[in-house]
Amino acid sequence: MRVHRETGLGYWLKRLEGQLDVEELIIECCRALIELSSADRCSIMVLDSRTEELVVRWAQGIRVKPYGTTRFRVGEGLCGWVARSQKPLFSFDALKEKRFMPFPPASRKFKQVKSIHCIPLVYEKRTIGVINLSSFSASPKFQKAKGRLSEQFLNRLAQVIAQVTLLREVEANSDRWRNIVKTASDAVSQVSHEVRTPLTLVMEGAQQLLDGFGGNLTDEQRELVGLLKIQSERMLKLVTELLDLSKIEAGRMAIHRKPIHLTEIIQDVRRRYEPLVVPRRMDLRLGRVPAVYGDKLRIGQIIENLLINAVKFTPPEGLITVSLEAKGRSAEITVADTGVGIPKKEQRRLFERFFQPKTPDNLKMRGTGLGLAIVKEIVQMHGGTVRVDSHPGKGTSFIVSLPLYTPAFALTEEFRLMREQASREGSVLACQLFQADLHTMAMWQETKEFLQKYVPKEDRVLINPDGGLVVFSVMVDPNGLQAMRRRLEQVSSDHPEFFPPAFVRWGWARVPEEGTELPMILQLAKSRAEENLFIQKTSLKV
Amino acid sequence: MDTVKRVKVLVIDDEEDARKLLCRRLLANQIDAIDAADGITGLELVKKEKPDLILLDIMMPKMDGLQFYQALREDPETKDVPGIFLTALCQGETMDRHSLELIAQAKHGVELDDNYLIVGKPYEPEVLIAAIHSLVNKKSNP
C-alpha cells in the first residue's frame, strides 16, 4: 500500500491526532473511507481477544445496526481470513470467492454485497480488527480507489482503535472491581450492625447484674460477670473497628471537619480513660497550639487508640505522657510511654491490620490489632502523618502531626477529598486549579468570555487552562450563592460549548471559619475513559 | 409524704430484650417506664399515657425512629414531647446531630427540631439517665 497524498486523509489524520470524542471520530472516519473509496458500506470489526471473534463495532451505510450480533471467527469468511493473514483482500465478485461467508441467517435483511475490500488493522504486530469496505455493484470506481488509502492513516486508525478497546476493558474491569469492593463493604457493615445489637444487650445485661439488679453477687459471681462484660466489650470494639476500616476502604467514612483545638480533645480523652490508665501515671504537657482542621470525634479516636496502645505495653509503675506542641505549620501530638518498647524489625509492621507485637506475659491486655491501622488511616484522611520512635526496654513514642488550620489549607483539603470522591465514583475532577485574577490570568478565549459575561467580578475564580472550569465564590450570602448556582446550571445547559462534552455535575464544599462559610461551586466533568488520556495530572494550588 | 411526680418514659424498640433491659434500668433509677415494639403502637401510647419523654431506637422496620419523631411533631397533642435517639448507627461514638439531621433530610426529607438528644449504643447508664433528666427539666423550666 503506498502512502497517498490525499488531502482528505491528511485532514483526517490531523483529526486523529488531536480529537477527543473518539467514538464520533471513528464514525466520521468510516464516512470518509466510504467517500474516498467510492464504497457503499463501511464497517469496522474489532477482534475480541477472549473469544477470537470479529465483532462489528462501527458501521456506516448499513441501515440495520449489526453491532455485536454479527460475529466471525478468525479464519472464517473473508474478514476472518484477512484477520489471520494480516493481508488486505480485494474481491471484485465476493460471492464467487470460496472463502466468502454471507452474514449469518439472522442478518439476512442486509442487502447482499458484490465487491468487497477487507483491510486488516494491525497494531504492534497484532491484529486488532478489520475494515470492510463493500460495494453493492461491481463498480470499476470502487476497484480503482483501493490504492487510495494511505498506510499512515490506517496505522494511526489502528492505534486509536487499539487504545479505545483497551480502555473499554480497563473501564469495565474497574467498574467490576468497584462493585466488588462496595458489595463487600456493604456486607461488613450489615454484619457488624447485626452483631453489635446483641452484643450491646449482653453488655447491658452483665452491667445490670453488676449493679445488683438481680440481687447481691458473691465475689466469684462478680468476677465471672465482669469477665463476661469485658470480653463482650472487646468483641464490640473489634466489630466497630472492622466496620470503621471497611468504611474507610469504601470511602464512606464521613469526616466533618472544622477548626478544632486539640487541647480540649486531649483533656476529654484523659477524663474518659483515666480509670484504664491507673495505676500507671499519666502526664499531660500541652503547649499553646492554634487550631487544626479536623473531625473532633475522629481525632479523639486517634488519641484514644494511641493511649490504649500505650497502656497495653506499659507496666503498672510506668508513665504515659501526652504532649502537644506546634511544629512549623503543624501540630504534633506525642503519646510516649515508658513501656517495653518495640524491636526495630517489628516497627515497620506496626500499622498493618491485625499485627500484634509480642507482649510480655505480665501485660496480658490484648487488643484487636486494628487500632493503629485505623490511626494511620484517619491521620491520612486529615492530611497528616504518624510515626513511631521506640527503644526496646525504654519505651515508645507515637508522634502524630496534623496541619494547622488556615482557610487555604481547608480549601485544598476539601478539593482533595472531592477529587478522591470523584475518582471513586469513576468521574474525574477535570480541573487544574489556579488562584486566578480574572483580568491577569491568561486563559482560553471562550472561558474568558464566559466568565466576563456570567460571573460577577468580585467572585474569585479558579480556572482550568484545559477549558474545564471551577468557580470559587467567596460570597457569603447563601441566597447569592443559590442564585449563582442556578445561573451556572442554566448557562451550562444553554452553552454546552463552555463545558466538556461529558456529564457535568455540581458539587459543593463548605469551608467553615469561625462562623463564616466560604462556599464553592465546582464542576465535575464525568469523564469517559478515552478522555482520560488527555486530561493532565491534576494538581492544586490554592 | 414526698409527692414529687415521677418521670415517665416511653421506650420504643423493636427488640424485646432491649426494651426489657432499658425499662429495668429506668425503674432502678426511679423513672417509670412503658414500652412499645413499634412506632404505630408508640403513637397510641403517647396519647394515652402522656409520657414525659420518649426513648427511641432509630433502625426499626416499618416506621423508623425518625419517621416516628416526625409523626410526633405533626400532632399538636404530642408535638412538645422530647425524644432521645438511641443509636448504634454511628458506631462506637455518639452520633453528632449534624449527621442525624442529614440522614433525616436525605431519607425522609424532614427537618428535626431541637427537642431531642442522641445517646450512642452501648450507652453508659449514667449518661442516659442524665440525658433524660436534662430534657425533662428543660421542658418543665423552659
Image (cartoon, helix red, strand yellow):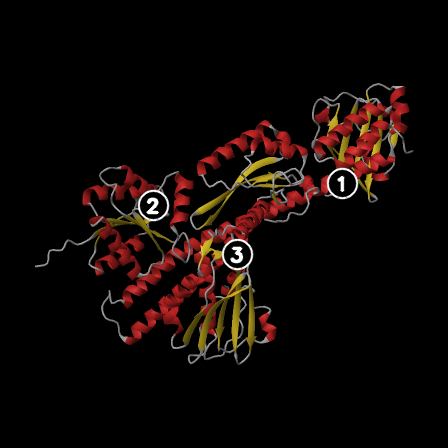
Disc 1 is attached to a residue of which chain? Answer: A
Disc 1: CA contacts within 10 A as few (<14), some (14-19) or many (>=20): many
- Residue A328, position as x, y percentages in the image: 55, 63
Instruction: Indicate the secondary structure of the residue bearing disc 1.
Output: helix
- Image quarter (top left, top right, bottom left or bottom right) of the N terminus of chain A: top right
Residue drawn 54% across the image and 33% down it: A488
Q: Chain of mark 2?
A: B
**Callouts 1 and 3 in the same chain:** yes
Q: Nearer the viewer, residue A70 or A338?
A: A338
**Mark 3 crowd level (few <14, some 14–19, many ≥20, 10 Å Cα):** many
**Residue type, numbered disc 3:** His
Quarter residue A526 falls in: top right
Residue under pointer 2 = B65
Q: Can you identify the residue that label 3 sits on? A: A382
What residue is pinned by disc 1?
A162
B141 sits to left or right of A485: left
Q: Is residue A412 left or right of residue A307?
A: right
Amino acid type at image mark 2 = Gly
Q: Which mark is residue A504?
A: none
Q: Amino acid at mark 1?
A: Ala
Mark 1 and mark 3 lie on one chain; the one further toward the N terminus is 1
